[in-house]
Image: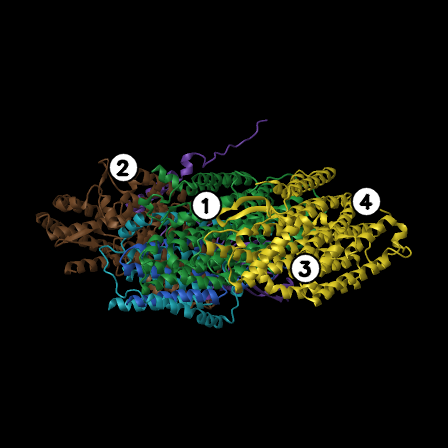
Amino acid sequence: MSMAAIIVAVLSFVLAALLALMMIPVLVWLERRGAGLMQDRLWPNRTNVGGFRLGGVVQSFADVVKLVMKEEYYPSHIKMGKWLYMLAPAITFAAALLAFMVIPFADNIVIDGESLRVQALPVEYGIFWYMAIGAIGVVGIVFGGWLSHNKYSLLGASRAGSQMLGYELPLGLTVVAMLITYNTIDFNAMVQWQSATVFGIFPAWGIVVQPLAAVIFIIAMFAETNRAPFSVAEGESEIVAGFMTEYTAMKFAMYFMGEYVAMNTASAVIITMFFGGYQLPWVSTGYLLENFAIFAAVMMPLLPIGVFYFIRWMRKNNRVRASVSSDGGRLFETKVFTIVLTIMTLIIEMLLIYLILLPSDALGTAIAVTIFQIAVFVVKLMLFNLFFILVRWTLPRFRYDQVQHLGWYYLLPLSLINIFVTALIVVGVS
Amino acid sequence: MFEQLFLILPMAIVVMGAFVLLLLSKTFSLDKLNLVAVFFLSLSFIIEILRFGTTTVCYSFPEIFGKMYIIDDFSILFDLMFTAGAILTLLINTAYFKSRNYYNGEYFALILFSVFGMMILAHSNELVTAFIALEIASLSVFALVGYHKYNKVSSEAMMKYMILGSMTGAFFILGTAFIYGAVGSTNLEDIAAYVNVPAEKDLVLVLIGGIFIMVTILFKMGAVPFHSWVVDVYQGAPFPVTMFMASTFKIALFAIALRLSLIDFASLNIVWSEILQVITVLTLIGGSFLAITQKSIKRMLAGSSVVHSGYMLIAYSSIGLGSDMAAPAIMFYLISYFLSAAGAFGILSFIATGSKKMMTYEDFKGFSERRPYLSAMMAIFMLSLSGFPSTIGFLGKFYIFTSAIESGQILLAGLGIVTAFISVYYYFKLIAMMYFYPSTDQQKKFPFDFSGLLIGVMAMMVIWGGVGTSLIPFIPGANGLIDIAKQAIDSLQNVL
Amino acid sequence: MDPILTYIIFLPMLTAALLGLTRASLPLLRLGTVLSSLLVFVLVMFVSMDFDPDGGMQFLRIVPWIAHYGITYYVGVDGLSLVLLILIAFLMPLLYLYMWKERRKGYWYNMMMLQTGVTGAVLSLDLILFYLFWETMLLPIFVMIGRYGNGMHQFNAMKIVLMTVLGSMSMLFSILYLGYDLFKQNGWWSFALSDLSMLQLNPQTTIWLAGGFLLAFAIKIPLVGFHTWMAPAYSSAPTPAVVILSAIMAKLGIYGLWRFGYGLFEQTLSYYAPFMMILAIIGLLYYAVHAIMEQNLRRMFAYSSGSHLSLIALGVFLTNVYAWGGSLYFIATHALSSAGIFIMIGLLYKRVKSVTIDELSGIASVAPRFAFFFVFFALSIAGLPGTGGFVAELLIIIGAFKVNVWIGVLTATTMLSSMLYIFWMLQRTIFGPPSMRTQIFVDLNSRELAMLIPIVLLLLITGIVPSLFIPLFEPYVTTALQDLMMTIGAK
Amino acid sequence: MTPDHFFLLAILLFSIGLIGIVSRRNLFVVYMSIELMLSSVNLVLAIFSRLHGDMHGSVIALLLIAVIAAEAALFLAMIVHLYRLKRTLDSDAFRLLAQKDSK
Amino acid sequence: MEKKIKIVPRYGVSLKDKLYLPAIYEGLKITFKHLIDNVSDSNAIDVLEYPEEQPTDITERYRGLHRLTHREDDSVACVACFMCATACPSNCIFIEATERTDNVDEKMPKRFAIDTLECIFCGYCVEACPCDAIRMDTGIFSLTGKNREDFVMEKEQLLAHKGAFGEENSIARK
Amino acid sequence: MLENSIFVLLALFLLLGSAGMVGFKQTLFSAISFMMAMLALAGMFALLDNSFLFLAQIMVSVGAVVVLSLLVIVSVNVKEENLPKEPAKFRWMLFAVVLVAPLAIVIYKALTYMPHTWAKTGEGYGSLKMMGMTLFKDWVLPFEIVSVLLLAAMVGAIVIARKEPSNDA
């Protein structure tokens, strides 16, 4: 292993860990803020550190602090298996986290002729890994629910388990169809496959090539992650909080975070399989590498314009109403951000100039392309997470029997038909 | 391509039938489903019967399947028995299905699945395929045994059978793993080639693997150290399922056992025959004891089925000791047992249709006055099972004992004769019950029934197979059957 | 390749099958049965006309059956079997006549099956075929006793079947071993008697094999020690079955001893002969004592026939021309007279519903014709001079004296003891004042007369002019004996 | 880490499965013991596959995993059914058949 | 006479309805529109900056904190009949009765306490009261305290509360 | 060296898991022990360079079988008092050990006759590609009939577990 390989591996691992873990507060914030905005109301927006509210993200960190500091409390009726009771949330969390580790954040980076995977776990069987490890998550839920010795928890656990089993099948079958299409199980190869175009016009993303599979897959993913409208396992309106009823403090937080990590992972898998992963449409890695100067040139004007508009938006919105006497340091925050953003833009502009001057096969270009792709990936990831949240605050929760009905009666046959049609087409084309 | 397809057509038809039945199970009535199942089975049956004797040994789709799927007269004969057994089970029990409310469409699909598994088992020339085929058949039969779900006895029988059956299944695959470890292949021909060039050190693993496989087979056929489930399961299962098990599943195990001993482990037989002899002795004695102590006919037949396994094991252990006729004797005995046991169980379930009785010996008192034809048939089947001359059962036993004497196992043959003598007691007891006592129920009129006719045909076949043909020329009788059996065995031995 | 024997064997069974499957009405059934038996009788007459006493086996028919094992359908007739064949064919119509009023159809079917069984056993020359018929004739007896018998008939039926099957299973084992030995020596399979009799066997093995056969025959005869089924079976069986049992089936044991015992194991039987003779003599005395003490007429005559059959068995083992001739002759005459007496007991039972000696008395005064026939048959059993039994017994006794004086003396006691119990019985039942039961005794009607008179006539003829019959089987006896002496001498 | 170690492990697993079946009455444990036995065969197959250096053993193991799944389905269905029937997981609670011919 | 028939349109019959996806899309569109609108101008969201701004729209029917009414002589109107405690679904009313010696009535509560942490503000007690002794028209919607005991309203506190909506007099209606 | 320690660790987990599976009274603890054993077994496959088997083991044995078992445990929700009373459990186990030990020793002895060195594996041993090649070149028939097996098992399971009104008890 060369030095570069080790560095890339370590960096990818760090990136993955960051993306998985640091995304949690962001997602919590996004959920709260998104929910507020979608429902015409505000969001937790008063917590600040020296006037910096970061639009409310600080609240999430405050929550973390609160949850960590809270008293560890065991319900006294839990007689046996306390260790397992404690371990259960960790299983869920760890499974979700591990499943995230095979997502490629960028195309293989070529350093000194060595092609290196930008993946936390540089393995080729990505989707299988996800399905294998992701399925373990529910084990933690079932353990927790059963050991809580609480009817609500038990119901929640059994719901989670059966829902997961019911949707694992259409999920797997859709994956089979996608495997037939992509002819690989490697996530990275899948993304590369998607860099082509269909009929020369549309990007050959999974959702374009296999719309039905995409729909089924996304629905099944919603169910797998226990997100609304499939959040029957928590089902606040019927069974208090499902399997989490008896959990408090950090143990609860583990479940909570596990869910967000799972959602994040699901988004990552979905965009990798169906939305071109780290790629922009019509732009393959090779093309990007060769013509990075053009991209940099295009970005050079776009970036300041974007920042300008962002600052304007911030100035407009980051203030309190007339009725409130103190503004809590918002004006100061806006000012600081304006300066920081301007300086950052200037730095990036300079970097872009430097990149334009570099030859296309230089190491710097490769790194820049990788960073660019990572950025694209993160943006897509955020967008899809937003989609998750959007759906949650749009659709009402299904009834439990409806969930099962949908899974077994519609998605399963549909995915089977999809495999059949896919196979026919693939055979016909080849 | 199409020739190759034609080779696997019977199996394909059966499994296709299962799919069709599954699809139709909600829309069709039981009668129609039954007919559909019988239709598919008969189609397969007809194709096989046309093919018997005309095909040379060959492999289906050799470029795809390798040498896993072998087609020879041996397997075709077994296919014929399985399909015939299933057809008979379904046709005879038509009324039974309607009289019980726990039957539904999946039942027929499971029967067809099971038949499919057995057919593959007979055709498989490879141990893993055999294992999976065995599992298909077993799992379907497990579910069938527990089909009367809200009957605790049925469920309990299923539980026992499933636990013990799955456990021994693990032994089969462990044995297969060992053989794979030693030989590097699980194809029977490769194994045979390996075994026939002995290198003492390596054969140990093959031997132990083979013993494990044998344990499974012996268990499933109910030989004595592994017999504990037989009586209970046979009693617990619904009548048609008992009939199905007795008339097909038991036979299926001899298919693989014969193929193994004749192709695969032929040169190791000499090692095993002593173990087999001990097991045979135990089986004969234990089975007789089981059968003689029962009061219920179903349990008695179950116990006696152990004894019949014992008879076949006599011949089976003779194979290794150089008896040429042992294998055909087993084949013939299988046919004879198939006819007689299927008939006997068929009559039981036919009677059970109208009543919910336990079917003890006492229940048969005066049966001959109520149902003269049925009791006559029952008597014929009992005679055949006890090996009374002029029935097919006698010839079966004749071949078995002769092969045992031929291979020098005089004492074993003697023991077989002693157990045959004991079996006369419990079989004739039923005849005595039917004929010697006045009927306790009042006379009932029974309408003409297709199932009854079918049982009658089987009874005729039992007689016909036993008497043979010396009086009526041009009809192949006992000779024909033993020739068929020989032909099948020859085709098996021609592989090497 | 004359199929006439085949017809004789299978005609009754086919009739039974045909009538049974068509559910024939009772008159039709009766008619068919009688016709078939008469037809069989006519066929048998043809056979005996064409029979050449010096010709050995005749009317052979060999059809391959189970080719691989050389099992054939192989039937033929010689002097020995002809006697039994004629007996069967003669007795069966009479029995049907006896059953004329019988309304239970099963009776008729079983009797026809039985006829096929016994005829086949007598005629078959292939051991497997013989075994087939040997077992087949058991089944109707089983059903007859179990279904139509009285007393503990179910139990007794089971008992006779189990004991007989025990014998036949041992015989089967011997047969199989013989067949295999033939195969080992010659390389081809056969179960024909003629092939098997040429076998060279290891003497030690032969003893076992012969034991297998002997067990079967000893149970069938029955020799003492193997007799526990006899008295119960006789007492609970219906009359036709009893007649068949004593008149034919017991004789088949003797026949088997002759045909297969001496046919296959000449030398070995001489090893067994002392034991068997001792058994037979014990039987003679033991049965006679039992007969004297017995109150039940059926059981009494059961023991009496046991006694006589022991005598015949003794005759067979004595192996000289007198004893053999006497035995063979006694088979015929005893069959006739025991058939007669059991028919009489059946008639008696029909009339008074009792066969206990104490309850009967003075039949002679009420029903003279009945009394006459009863006395006649009883005396013929006892060996009254002028009936065939006397001649036969005399021959056997002479044969016994030729072997050993003491055996002769013991043998001669049968005549005395039989006279003793017969006369005592007659005195108590036939003569004296009529008892309660016998007062309304109905005398024989014409149908019954018609069935009894032929037996009486035949008995008289055999007794008065034995020379009429002896030529039929005498050549067989002499040649068989010569063979025997030669083989024993050769070794 | 020689093959022998692996073999020892596999045999131990198989034996533990067997012991579980023999000694326990809890249907669930019995079921899992059977699964364990089959899985240990899987290990044996994988070892042999590695020893031979071909993939056949692995493929057999893969097929066996499918068989395990099939058996699991049937077993679990049976356990649910039996529990519904008897409200217990005790295999000894089912002894109707042991009473010989009660009727 | 013309029959009044209201024809209710049936949904979920057409293929479009059965597919659900178009409907989901519509829903998402609405939500998304709100999101975008609010992001672009979050000040346009019509909200109350609560601690600073107080609600102005509390009406008479609003069930706020409880109070006990007085008689003309300022003594407690309650007769300790236990009707309210009986009617209370969450068992939050605790009454200890005592004899009334001033000849106004027979009984009066010695202790009358409401645990507001238990209370679900359903108003059943008000409905149940036969002598208008308990009302929920104080308009107090926000209760704060530092420990649990602070939330148990004793008789004195309850008597001290004033009605917020016109009925300033706390005299019980007869 | 690393491999050795991993092996020891996994073996420990495997044995502890399976022993716990047999030993625990509570069904759920048995199940989690079983899961641990299965995961460790998957690790063993990985140690044997069999990455695909590793994943398949996790996916099927853990992801499907164990989860299904857990689900069943949770949904039947066995009460403490409905668990079988097994006072002599460990005595039985001792008995079973005595019973099984000779068998195990014999098998082990037989297995030690095998070659003691690992074969050189070619490129891509244990990978999906090679697995697929072998599966579809040499093992098509078992692969095909395994699908029938699964279907039959499914039908059987549905038939057994389905609740139906029945008065024929």
- Chain represented in purple: E
Tell me the kind of residue under disc 1: Leu
Is label 4 in a helix, a strand or a loop?
helix
- Chain represented in yellow: C
What is the C-alpha distance between the residues marked 4 and 1?
61 Å
Vertical relation: B330 (above or below) E4: below
Q: Residue under circle 1?
A: B77
For marks 4 and 3, the one nearer the N-term is 3
Q: Residue under circle 3?
A: C315
Is label 2 in a helix, a strand or a loop?
helix
Tell me the kind of residue under disc 2: Val
What numbered label is drawn on residue A429?
A: 2
What is the C-alpha distance between the residues marked 2 and 1?
44 Å
What is the C-alpha distance between the residues marked 3 and 1?
55 Å
- Chain represented in green: B
Spot occupied by residue A4 in the image (x, y as percentages of width and height):
15, 58
